[in-house]
Amino acid sequence: MTTRSLLGAAVIAAVTLSLPAQTTTSIVADKDTALYESASGTLANGGGSTLFAGLTGQPKLRRTLLHFDVANVIPQGSRVLSAQLEVSVINVAAPNPMAAAHRVTQAWSEGTTVAPGGQGGGGTAQSGDATWLHSDYPNSFWSSPGGDFATLASFSIPLATSSSVSSPAPGLISDVQNWLDAPANNFGWLLIGDEATPGGAAKIHSRESSNSTKHARLIVSYLMPGEVAAWGNGCPVGAGTMNLALSGVANGGVTIPLTYSNAPLSSIGATFFALDLAPAGVELSVSCSAYLPLAGVILAGVTFATDAIGNGAASFTVPAGFPGYLIACQGAVLDGTPSVFALSNAGVMLTQ
């Protein structure tokens, strides 16, 4: 087997590429409320400081609605590379608590009702509240009690006490991208907690909490058209990690330099390309992750050589006439170890 074919077979069998972005921003919820199971649909807490998800000790169901105005924060035409939801849990009794986040399919109103006491029982609904039966009390109804939402959850999030952060799941990223591209379809998520364990409902800080650091937020990384960026970390090589740096503007016809450093010495490598990303990466060995999607198409570029101090250079010419495409790349260099090769961090570009 030739060196080139060995490198290609090894990387295509093991590589997965993940890509976050040049800009990372935090988007705080602009609407949130809890839905309280009620046959009359007259309980609400739209202006309250807490949210609930799961089954109470009565037992009664509680669900949480969250909305984020993505299109008001991220520029149109951008590509979402990674997104995570963060919530702050006050307390929860369920074992291994998790919540499934379902995309809501109907508009809803937050309302201003503030429930008494610990707010777990809800307050008397007022005009503009969302309730178990109403998307906007008292005249607009959900199609089904408990809210209208996609059957398949977009992602899940742990509800451990204190700060809980989801992984950058593909469904979460897809929802945020769709809300950026089509803001009129953004109705947020419904969090459904443990609905089988009585007393296991999670109590969560709402956006009305006096502690603004506890408000639910989206952490989103994205690229704007023409931008290039590095993403993730390369594999350990010596005392450092293999590094890939990109520069330039991703306009059609422009050649983007790909500069490698701290790679295996005096060896041969190649840059691999894909049109998709896996933001968290796939760990192949300790502190060594691949960032290109194995389930998709991965293409190998021209090979390059590294010198006696581990530097190497390659390039990529952006295809003309194809704006709005995300292109991800990652380098692999033969290293003579049982792992066969070392990987760089990823590079990403959004064509314009």
Image (cartoon, helix red, strand yellow):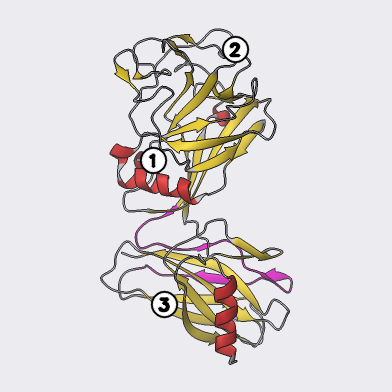
Vertical arrangement, residue 226 with respect to residue 310, above or below: above
Q: Spatial distance from mark 2 to mark 3, Cα to Cα?
A: 59 Å
What range of the chain is rendered magenta?
222-250
The reply to whether discs 3 and 1 touch (Cβ–Cβ < 8 Å) is no
**Labelled disc at residue 283:** none
Graded by Cα atoms within 10 Å as few (under 14), some (14 to 19) or many (20 or more), the crowding at tag 3 reads some
Point 50% across, 32% down: residue: 191
Q: Position of residue 5 (x, y in %)?
A: 55, 87
Residue shown at 58% from the left, 74% from the top: 13
Which residue is painted at 34% across and 11% down in the image?
127
In the picture, the disc for residue 70 is 1
- Residue 112 or residue 195, whichever sits in front: 195
Give the structural element (helix, strand or loop) at label 1: helix
Instruction: Say which label, 3 or 1, has the lower sequence index.
Output: 1
| Label 2 element class | loop
1 or 2: mark nearer the eye: 2
User: Which residue is denoted by mark 2 in the rendering?
Assistant: 118
Judge whether residue 136 can be spotted in this image. yes
Q: Point out residue 119 in the picture as x, y percentages from the top left corner.
A: 55, 13
Q: Is residue 322 above or below residue 168?
A: below
The residues tagged by marks 1 and 2 sit, at their Cα atoms, a distance apart of 31 Å
User: Which residue is the site of mark 3?
Assistant: 316
Which amino acid type is marked by label 1? Answer: Val
Q: Does the rendering let one see residue 305?
A: no
x and y percent of residue 304 in the render?
53, 86
Could you tell me which quadrant the C terminus lies in?
A: bottom left
